[in-house]
Amino acid sequence: MYWYIDTLCPALSSPGFESQRDQLSLGIHTDRMLKYTDADEEGPMSKQRRILKRQKSAKRAHIRRKNLLLDQSKIDRAKRLFRVSTETEAIHRALDAVVDLEAFQRELDKGFDALIGAGGFTDRFSR
């Protein structure tokens, strides 16, 4: 069973940490430390475990921390193009655009193959 750091660190119970406490109580990922204990299922955190299981079963993005060396000018350009304020959001949107572009290219290829097979195009440059 996981006990969050705010149960171990009274400083997180002070004013100003409400949003972090709320995120921790919902099982949302933060950079806070988790400590594993062998408490039984009916302990005070059993509701927490149910929430975590429900979140794992839901379809969601699989976010991982990555350390990358990237060209800052490209990141700045992506921020301007997508009109976002953070570099992370710019990179997410750029990657989404690449995935969408690849899917669009596949659809075009399928359509052209179907047209060529149906005699929709004639090659005027072949002799």
Image: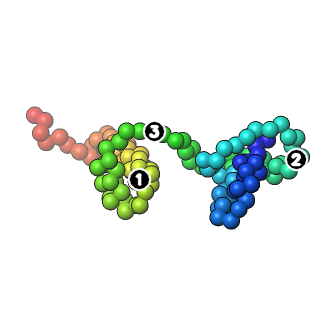
Residue at x-position 27% and y-position 46%: 120
The quadrant of the image that shows the N terminus is top right
| Residue 25 in sight in this render | no
Q: Nearer the viewer, residue 124 or 69?
A: 69
SS for dot 1:
helix
| Residue 88 in sight in this render | yes
Q: Is residue 7 above or below residue 124?
A: below
Q: Residue furthest bottom?
A: 15
* Cα distance between the residues tagged 3 and 2: 38 Å
Q: Specify which label sits upstream in the sequence, 3 or 2.
A: 2
Judging by the rendered image, the residue that carries numbered circle 3 is 67
Q: Please, what is the three-letter code of the amino acid marked with disc 3?
A: Asn
Residue 48, x across and y down, in percent: 78, 51
Judging by the rendered image, the residue that carries numbered circle 1 is 87
SS for dot 3:
loop
The quadrant of the image that shows the C terminus is top left
Residue at x-position 34% and y-position 50%: 75
Q: Quadrant of residue 84?
A: bottom left
Residue at x-position 38% and y-position 46%: 98
Q: Residue furthest front?
A: 11
Judging by the rendered image, the residue that carries numbered circle 2 is 43
Name the image colouring: rainbow
**Dot 3 and dot 2 residues touching (CB under 8 Å):** no
Q: Please, what is the three-letter code of the amino acid marked with disc 1?
A: Glu
Q: Nearer the viewer, residue 90 or 109?
A: 90
Q: Is residue 22 left or right of residue 91?
A: right
Q: Nearer the viewer, residue 43 or 109?
A: 43
Q: Specify which label sits upstream in the sequence, 1 or 2.
A: 2
